[in-house]
Image: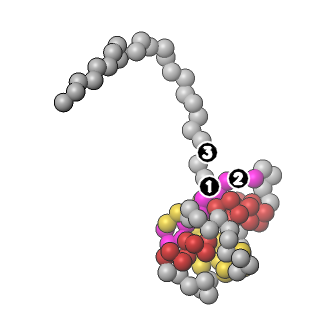
Amino acid sequence: DGRQIQVYFETKLPEEFKVTTAPFAVPARLSRLGLSEIINHLLELPKPRPFDFLIGGELIRSSLSNFLEAKGVSSEEIVAVEYCLLPGAPEEQLTAPHDDWVAAVAVCPY
C-alpha cells in the first residue's frame, strides 16, 4: 500500500542523536526497522545504530498503519514519534564452574 503518514521525530537522547522536528511523509508500511533506517540516514552516523520507537508512550511493534489504526489515530494527523536507542543484546558473563545441585527429579502421580 502506498499510503503516507506525516510524522515528526522527537527524542530524549543527547544532542548528537537529535534530528530535525520538521514533519516527514513516511510510508505507512514502515515498522521499527524502516524508521530506524530513516533516523540513521538523518543522523549520518559512521556506524548505523538500532533504534526503538514509541507513539503515545507505547512501543511500535507493527507497521505504522496497523499501530495507528489499532489506537484509533487518524492517518491524516501529524504523529509525534519518539525514538530511543535499542539496548544491545546482553553480554554473556563469565560464571564460575559449580556442581549441579539437582541430583534427580521424580514425578509423583496424583
The mark nearer the N terminus, 2 or 1, is 2
Q: Is residue 54 magenta?
A: yes
Circles 3 and 2: CB atoms closer than 8 Å: no
Judging by the rendered image, the residue that carries numbered circle 1 is 85
Q: What residue type is labelled 3?
A: Gly
Looking at the picture, how far across and down is residue 80, in whole percent? 59, 76
Q: What stretch is highlighted in magenta?
A: 48-57
Residue at 71 percent across and 63 percent down: it is 34
Residue that lies at the very extreme toward the bottom in this rendered image:
76
Judging by the rendered image, the residue that carries numbered circle 3 is 88
Residue at 74 percent across and 65 percent down: it is 38
Looking at the picture, how far across and down is residue 24, in whole percent? 72, 78
Residue that lies at the very extreme toward the front in this rendered image:
109
User: Residue 17 versus residue 103: which sits nearer the camera?
Assistant: 103
Looking at the rendered structure, the secondary structure element under dot 1 is: strand
Q: Is residue 99 visible?
A: yes
Residue 49 is marked as: 2
Figure quadrant of the N terminus? bottom right
Q: In this view, does 86 lie above or below 15?
A: above
Looking at the picture, how far across and down is residue 42, in whole percent? 77, 66
Residue 61 sits in quarter = bottom right
Q: Is residue 64 above or below residue 84?
A: below
Q: What residue type is labelled 1?
A: Leu
Q: In this view, does 67 lie above or below 105?
A: below
Q: Which amino acid does label 2 sit on?
A: Arg
Figure quadrant of the C terminus? top left
Residue 19 sits in quarter = bottom right
Instruction: State the separation of the CA atoms marked 2 and 1.
Output: 7 Å
Q: Is residue 24 visible?
A: no
Circles 2 and 1: CB atoms closer than 8 Å: yes
Q: Classify residue 78 as left or right of residue 41.
A: left
Looking at the rendered structure, the secondary structure element under dot 3 is: loop
